[in-house]
Amino acid sequence: MTALLDVQNLSLEFRSPGNPPIAALQDVSLTLDRGETLAVLGESGSGKSITAKAIMGILPKPASRITGGRIMFDGDDLLTLPPTRLRRVQGARIAMVFQDALSALNPVQTVATQIAELYRVHRGMGKKQAHAAAIEMMRAVRIPDAANRADDYPFQFSGGMRQRIMIAMALALDPDVLIADEPTTALDATVQAQILDLLGEITQERQMALLMITHDLGVAGQLADRALVMYAGRVAESGPIGSMFESPAHPYTKGLLGSIPSAAHRGGDLPTIQGLPPDIARRPPGCSFNPRCGYATAQCRTVLPHLDPFAPDRAAACHHKGEVIADAPVGA
Amino acid sequence: MPESTTSPQTARARRGRPRSGLRSLWKSPWFDIAAIIIVVVALMALFPSLFTHIDPRDCDLSKSRLGPEPGHLMGYDIQGCDYWSNIVYGARTSLEVGVYTAAISFVIALVAGSLAGYFGGVVDSVISWTSNVILGIPVGIASLVILYQFRSRTVWTIVFVLVLFSWAATMRYMRSSVMQVRNLEYIQAARGLGVGPWRILGSHVIPNAVTPLIVMTTLSVGAGMAAEAGFSILGVGLKLPAFSWGIQIALASQDGNWQIAPLLMFFPALMLGLTTLAFVVLGESLRDALDPKARR
Amino acid sequence: MLRYTLRRVLLMIPTLIGSTFLVYLLVFLIPGDPVTRLAGGEKRLSDSTIASIREQYNLDDPFFVQYAKYLWGVLHGDFGHDFNGNSVSTLIATALPYTVVLALTAFVLKLVIGVCLGVWAGLRQGRLPDKFNLFFTIFFLAVPGFIIAYFSQYVFGIKLHWLPISGVQAGFPLAFVMPAMVLALETASPLARLSRTSLVDTMRSDYIVTATAKGISPQRIMWVHALRNAFMPVVTYLGLSMAALLGGSVLIETIFNLPGLGGTLARAIDTQNGPVVVGVSIFLLLFYLVAALVVDLLYPIIDPRVRHA
């Protein structure tokens, strides 16, 4: 039984003239099924956004090159699909909500036109019909007074409303997989909560698979069933969100969880992860996390740890996962 | 008359690595050709006697408009003067107009832009308003009217009028880069600590902004030279007995002279065209070398 | 929309006053007697001529009054009279159609050449069309327009006999092809560069990525999403670029012997007809301001942010 979306050992590099290629993703695997929500966690530069864009097929072409792996979606490898067939998947069966809706929406087209474009291109609808469908979609994401606002331009909406329009656009063709790339980071806290509620509700209602890219563990905990922690372009740990948060197996996951304020920290400093976020152009030999890791041994500085399954549905790329799990729980 | 040869994307600056950039310049054959042309023309301007022994005023009317012959590679002009020695002696005027205009505009732009950008307020309003008016009018036409008012015109008259209209665009660029730097936090901090304006301008602002200014200036030399010739054609430029390529082109263009003897037009036009092209190639190469991101 | 239009019209006023004032100032404040200068130097003038010039330019009034009276006249279509008593306004009216035809033809050609070349280069970034574009822009940016004019007169007029060398006897399309083409080539370079840069920048923007993620074909992305956005800086520049076009038209009309405003101006310079020189120049300045205004008013059509501001 294969998953709806199955990314297998994806490796990808960026190249620019005159510089050596940079391995942005190494050996990244993930699976996602209908009705399931997967949170991809990590710092900026960890490769979480690049993974999403690679699945969506929107990485800049000559600058990025897939060096290995497959992206299986419903039986097809998206990486080898001819462009015309790939376009039938993009937007229709896999859709994406971007972080900054203001720049992600075309400034000179009305919002309805931009939503309607999907119906026109993928469903061959006429102008009027598509426009009506677009308004219907705007209502579905609860944009007040949708019919009257349909012919407004993106700059005339508030940040939260713009993000709703992005979501309406992504959901227009009822896709099987929805990818949300930090959909709430650009928004106010109260609006954030509304958008997250909306996403959760709609994906549940429509039995959609949701891939949620975020650096916010709270958001992940609220929405996701499973999580994937990325570090320096590799998967550090994956597993069901509950058990992972309870007993992290990778020191990096543990560090991330440790830096969430909780009652245990009252009056004291928040623990932070030592050192700087990873520079994928200059990975240290062995485990990329070793310079920042309290568990690091000589082995970590020379041997790259593989993502090993150690419990049902759980895996971590750490030589010392046993110690990490055995250690005192986070925050205590 | 070309209004301005600085294209809009000139107005984008980033600091390159001048050293290594300059070294890579020599690898480009286009740059080499441009440099050779400019050096040759500059030598003509400085030491005309290196290139010809014939007095450009030693004319023989019976040889009017005769074609090239041994010892007189470019033939004779309307008055029967040796055309090559006229070209050689004309180089100085043409180059002077271009170089002086560019250099003076550069200095004015640097000073006015620094003042307007750094001090703001009334100084800025006056300078910006003036430059906006200048940028808002067709320079070619305005300079024509002004030049017409001068009864005798020298190189400096032409330079004056060209400078009058050419400092504004460069100034605007300088002003915006000064304002950008001025608002950086470390500059704000330095000002708070009482570091004087001239020191800030001299050590932080100008070194950052000067590269694109030099590029813009280099690009404008050719425009000045072309304008000199354009004014001559229209009858508001230099006149005989001065020497300049513009005068040669203007005389050739009169009364259909060049239709009878096309070479009279060809030689000065070729020299002028090659030189203006050389300055633009030089400017573009400098931009690529010093400011590699500007063109991408 | 209304606010934008109003703002743009109001912004024109200081430029209008500033530029005419500048010209006027330089004409009448240069040392020496403006009367003899307007009459073209050493020529002996009768007392009645001198009196008429002094009266026409209100030279006996204080300077600012002179200027105000002149501007007032100009705004009423009165550009004064030359020494032979001909109305400069009539002269302008006769010449204007030729300049309008030349400038419009050149403008269209320049737009087509510049934008097509820039878009082509932008789409094939770093490849042959891009290199051709670079070569084209450098060449025409550098080589003065009059050299191209003489060269094409020689090739297409004298050698090939395809087009008339000069004059307007051949009528609209034929007589204007060469001058308009030269003028267009001379001024198309900055446009080609700007179109290229703008398209390259637009193709990198987030909403183009969004469009790709929507499964839209590259052709549709280009036509529906990229071009209109890429055109915005181009339209802003078009108004400004009218200056180069009109400035260049003076020289081109002279070289091709067209009886437009530029040609009239050059002939007036040649015959030392001061009032015509001043009158036609000021008219050209105004003409430019209006042309630039009209082009700028097109802007809200493509940018809704301005339209709804």
Image (cartoon, coloured by chain):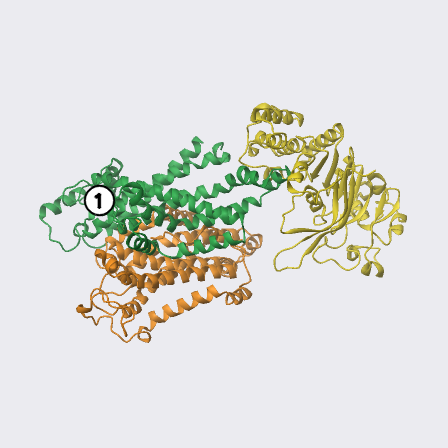
Tell me what hue chain A is rendered in: yellow
A150, above or below B199, in the image: above
In this image, A178 relative to C29: left or right?
Answer: right
- Residue C101 location (% of width, % of height): 31, 40
- State which chain disc 1 sits on: C
- Determine the image quadrant of residue A240: top right
- Residue A275: x and y in percent read 74, 55
Name the secondary structure under disc 1: loop
Query: Colour in which chain B is shown?
Result: orange
For chain C, the rendered hue is green
Q: Residues within 10 Å of mark 1 (few under 14, many from 20)?
A: few
Residue B156 sits above or below residue C26 on the image? below
Q: Residue at x 48, y 41 (%)?
A: C232
User: Residue at left 23%, top 46%?
Assistant: C264
Q: Amino acid at mark 1?
A: Pro
Query: Could you say which is closer to the camera, residue C37 or residue C110?
Result: C110
The residue beneath circle 1 is C62
Looking at the picture, how far across and down is residue C97, in whole percent?
27, 39
Q: Is residue A67 left or right of residue C249?
A: right
Residue beneath the point at 71% across and 30% down: A198
The one nearer the camera, C208 or B257, is B257
